[in-house]
Amino acid sequence: MDVKVHECSPDKRKPIPTDESSLGFGKIFSDHFFTMKYHEDRGWHDPVVEPYRTISLDPTALCLHYGQLIFEGLKAYRGRQGEIYLFRPMENIGRMNASAQRLCMPTVDPELFFEAIKKLVILDREWIPKGKGTSLYIRPTMIATEAALGVHAANEYLFFIVVGPVGAYYAEGFSPTKIYVSEDYVRAVKGGIGYCKAAGNYAASLYASKIAMEKGYTQVLWLDAVERKYVEEVGTSNIFFLIADELITPPLAGSILPGVTRDSVIRMAGSWGIRVSERPLSMDEILAALAAGTLTEVFASGTAAIVSPVGQMFYKGMDYIINDGKIGPLTQKLYHEILQIQYGEKEDPFGWRIRID
Ligand SMILES: *Cc1c(COP(=O)(O)O)cnc(C)c1O
């Protein structure tokens, strides 16, 4: 199947933002998007890059009622000579298909998926910002469109991809976050859909995030749903703790999103000879390490920020300061090295970067 291209007419094009310092995240979208439809009897059909537009849905479209809605998030980066790179896109494509399977949605041929991203990004290449740390955010999404109210897996779907310029996450330098350990609410449970980028997971997280923000914290640190003892993730990022030269992150056991950045951090730190463990880590162990002075760095990982240092943690009525509230050397080095690979500024020994222009 070939991806068709219907170009937007010149008079309908939107102005490309010139002030890259005020891009923010997820507010501006380019001139085109990709769409493809699915019907049980026909499979996927009509893949096309077309002018950006609103979509219309029947009010009973199943995604609006029972949550068959999955998505992905990745970025296109512009190199010094204007060349365009993606970072491990096949990982995002594979993860979207894993989410699709869990929610009884149809998978997409990875080659076609990749071709769709490539055609869209190349057509809208002028929208990729140039400033340091800026990028073009890519949001593939799949929704159930069948009009029906009985609870069942839909027989019709829409797959679309929108792209838009996003600003540098650290425009004002690193600012360590303050996190709030939620004891009352959980994000996901083993056996559920925590490992999928499925809309429902984010709806489930909003209330605890609101409480944390009202108390002055940036993010929620989620604990496991059963014992409320082991750390899982922070906000919509994975989490790492450096304790006595061991870099620890919770294992992928079903309730945690398998982050592409998480995997990159594990492999990169491992290649530097750091002992990296994917193992359960309890709040008791964290507090003991804090008391002993062996917990030296905590950071979140995700596509948005690469890594984000944690400077303070609230748990059971107490605030704990980590590394004097400053970014640690390992966090700093991981950020710098991954960023340079993404923007084509250094060798990529892992084969993570793909040039698409
Ligand atoms: C997207 C996401 C992550 C990070 O994944 P990356 O592939 O590194 O961007 C972590 N946790 C949650 C809940 C997420 O939605």
Image: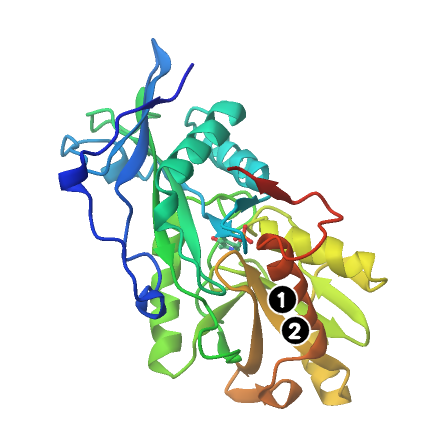
Q: How is the image coloured?
A: rainbow
Near-viewer residue (171 or 196): 171
Q: Amino acid at mark 1?
A: Tyr
Near-viewer residue (288 or 58): 58
Image coordinates for residue 227, horizontal then vertical, percent: 59, 63
Image coordinates for residue 78, horizontal then vertical, percent: 49, 52
Residue occupied by mark 1: 335
- Could you give the CA–CA distance between mark 1 and mark 2, rounded to whole angstroms? 5 Å
Residue occupied by mark 2: 332
User: Looking at the image, can residue 70 be seen?
Assistant: no
Does residue 88 lie above or below 299 as drawn? Answer: above
Does residue 209 lie above or below 325 as drawn? Answer: above
Quadrant, the N terminus: top left
The residue shown at (47%, 64%) is 235
How many other residues sit within 10 Å of disc 2, few (<14), some (14-19) or many (≥20)?
A: some
What is the quadrant of residue 66 in the picture?
Answer: top left
User: Looking at the image, can residue 328 be seen?
Assistant: yes
Near-viewer residue (205 or 53): 53
The residue shown at (21%, 31%) is 61
The residue shown at (49%, 64%) is 133
Question: Which SS class for mark 2?
Answer: helix
Residue lying furthest front in this view?
81
Is the residue under label 2 in contact with that under label 1 (CB below 8 Å)?
yes
Q: Amino acid at mark 2?
A: Gln
Near-viewer residue (214 or 341): 341
What is the quadrant of residue 312 in the picture?
Answer: bottom right
Specify whether 216 is left or right of 296: left
Residue lying furthest right in this view?
273
Image coordinates for residue 251, horizontal then vertical, percent: 68, 53
The residue shown at (31%, 19%) is 155
How many other residues sit within 10 Å of disc 1, few (<14), some (14-19) or many (≥20)?
A: some
Specify whether 38 is left or right of 267: left
